[in-house]
Image: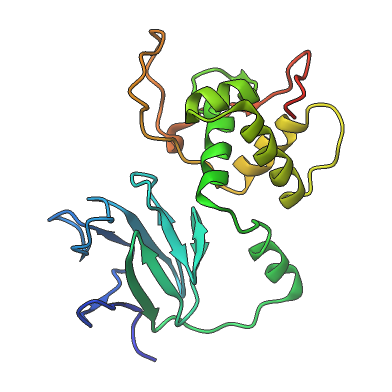
Amino acid sequence: MEDPFIRIEENGAVVPLREDVTTIGRGCAVDVRLSDPSVSRLHAEIIRRGPYAYVTDLGLSRNGTRVNGRLVARRVLEDGDVLTFGSARCRVGGIAREDFTAEVELRRSAAPELTRRELDVLTSLCRPALSDEAFVAPATAREIASDLVVTEAAVKQHLLRLYQKFRIPEGTNRRVRLANEVVALGLVRPLPPTGRPEPSQAPQPAPGNLPANATIGAEVHDRRAS
């Protein structure tokens, strides 16, 4: 079988995947360079582990990464998958096929399909988890509304739909349970700075540098935004 590769739809160029990490973006130093302006300078990576490969969106672009039309943060790839970085389409090939058990297939589909706005709401909800605190509470509906410059009512509607998509049952600390589920699935990415002045605070670590003991905890009084 041929070695794993990625094919750029725009020009038909075929780029072999590196043995470890293949970088993708619009910058000059990446392995797979895409000229589309919707692609960030360093947009995503394809990482190989033995016969497997997975794509990771680096969270540096508002336009995201899709696999077969579904927005993803990280996803194991299969032969023939269509990857979309911003508006630039590519296809991967040469990846060994494997029959998955029902249990593995269930895990692969655990993350529901989300709209861009729903991802923004989830990211804002979980933003406190990017702080240095070991015990944090997720953002309230009011804080999310202020962060995204939308109404609080709109945020509450998004949260209700997200509770249904992630199957978060009613009860106390519902936002906390949603936030923990999102973090566990690896769907959280930091939003770009809004430009609004914020209180002085210690620099926040990148998502990959989140303290190992950091968890999203319940507030003493859960506000029902929720």
Q: Residue 101 vs residue 26: left or right? A: right
Residue 138 visible in the shown view: no
Q: Position of residue 87 (x, y in %)?
A: 33, 63
Residue at x 53%, y 37% (from the top left corner): 123
**Residue furthest to the left:** 28
Figure disc tally: 0
- 91 lies above or below 169: below
Q: How is the image coloured?
A: rainbow
Q: Residue at x 69, y 38 (%)?
A: 157
The quarter of the picture where the C terminus appears is top right
Q: In this orientation, which residue lies closer to the viewer: 123 or 46? A: 123
Quarter placement of the N terminus = bottom left
Left or right: 126 as drawn, with respect to 19: right
Q: Residue 13 location in percent, x, y? A: 20, 80
Q: Is residue 162 left or right of residue 194?
A: right
Vertical arrangement, residue 223 with respect to residue 67, above or below: above
Judge by depth and name the residue closer to the eye, 53 or 185.
Answer: 185
Q: Is residue 164 above or below residue 110?
A: above
Is residue 41 shown above or below 194? Answer: below
Q: In the rendered image, is residue 143 in sight?
A: yes
Q: Position of residue 95 (x, y in %)?
A: 44, 80
Instruction: Estimate the x, y position of residue 48 in percent, counting from the top left.
Output: 40, 66
Extreme residue in the bottom direction? 1
Q: Tell me which corner region of the image, top left, top right, bottom left or bottom right, holds residue 213.
A: top right
Residue in front for this viewpoint, 224 or 216:
224
Q: Quarter-wise, where is residue 45 in the image?
A: bottom left
